[in-house]
Image (cartoon, rainbow, N blue to C red):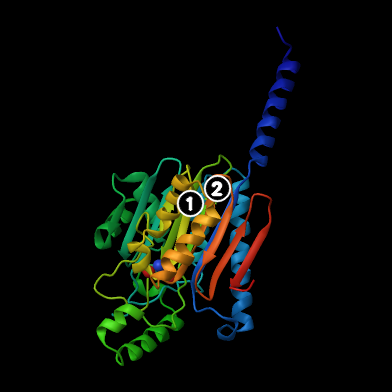
Amino acid sequence: MLSDFVQKAIFIFVFCIGAAAQAQSPVAIALHGGAGTITRAKITAEQDAAYRLIMDEVVTFGYQRLNAGVSGNQVVVEVLQKLEDSPLFNAGVGAVMTWDGVHELDAAIMDGATRQAGAVAGVRHIRSPIEAAQKVMLHSPHVMLTGVGAEEFAQQQGLELIDNSVFTTERRQKALEQYKEHQSLISLNDAQDTMYQDYKFGTVGVAVRDSRGDLSAGTSTGGMTGKRWGRVGDSPIIGAGTFADNASCAVSATGHGEYFIRYQVASDICARMKYLGISLQQAANVVVNQVLRDADGEGGIVAVDSEGNVALVFNTEGMYRASVDTSGKKTIAIYRDE
Ligand code: ASP
């Protein structure tokens, strides 16, 4: 019979080994705040600094939460909520406006360990669309809920419903005015195709590998300025703007959603890794810089793979992006040449 003292000592030893193993398991995080015509000429020094500051804060927060053992799914939600609350991004507060001058929000989350997923689309009164998407994943038998039904479900789940005007900012009101002015000068067909050249996207998304090695991804957006007829983009569509599978990678995309839907960008990157045995970086490069570019689809992705490799790939002039890799190396960047 071991003495009490020896038993306690063994317990403490085993506990410490476990904690050390947990702390050492490599976590990684990559986030984006949208891609588009983002150049130094178009952004003031103050704006540049403000974007870098919030991305730094949020990516550091996410990395710390992952290292503390919080599940990847939960970290995806917490990180995106911080970005939804920032008026700088096109998600939650600060979301772009539809043709009718309101906000219709889309979000999705996917759990790479179970391939469970949840999404909401076209919601107008849910304060945190990514949290609603998580509720759909965890507490409904469905993957995607839309509009009024999604809001009813969210309310039943105890989420706060708010006035649509809470999301409104002056900047997005001006963008809608400019967009309408531009549209009045061109035909409807051209309008469909260009969705206004000078837009900066601003969708937010994140991909993570947690301390158990599980992958998750999530995306939240207001879509595109001036969207009509209940248009839904790629962000809430599993496989297009959001995808995660422990066997390959987790991806969140941003860009001209119609192309990302038709080319199934997020799942195509993971499928290429899995079936062709190529690296995450190679797969993302081919899809974003060849397949999408050849089709004139603008945008980018952030991704992590099952080993914790990170990819930040885009074919536009800039993409707000931040990551911390498994060695703890942090990247914060905006423009193509950095
Ligand atoms: N992909 C989003 C959409 O098409 C927009 C964006 O990423 O900025 O709705």
- Which class describes the residues within 10 Å of circle 2: few (<14), some (14-19), or many (20+)? many
Looking at the image, which is closer to me, 38 or 107?
38
What is the x, y in percent for residue 274? 46, 45
Residue furthest top in the image: 1
How far apart marks 2 and 1 lie (CA) works out to: 8 Å
Where ligand 1 lies, by quadrant? bottom left
Residue 47: x and y in percent read: 59, 79
Q: Amino acid at mark 1?
A: Ala
Work out which quarter of the rendered image holds the N terminus and state it. Answer: top right
Residue pointed to by mark 1 = 250
Q: Position of residue 203 (x, y in %)?
A: 45, 68
Find residue 209 and report its horizontal and vertical position in percent: 55, 47
- The reply, left or right, for residue 128 in relation to residue 284 is left
Residue 226 seen anywhere in this rendered image of the structure:
no
Q: Amino acid at mark 2?
A: Arg
Q: What label sits on residue 288 in the rendered view?
A: none
Marks 2,1: beta carbons within 8 A: yes
Few, some or many C-alpha atoms within 10 Å of disc 1 (few <14, some 14-19, many ≥20)? many
- Asked whether, in this view, residue 7 is left or right of residue 213, the answer is right
Q: Which mark is residue 209?
A: 2
Label 1: which secondary element: strand
Quarter-wise, where is residue 141 in the image?
A: top left
42 shown above or below 19: below
- Residue 11: in sight, yes or no? yes
Residue at image location 58% in from the left, 73% down from the top: 336
Towards the viewer: 55 or 115: 115
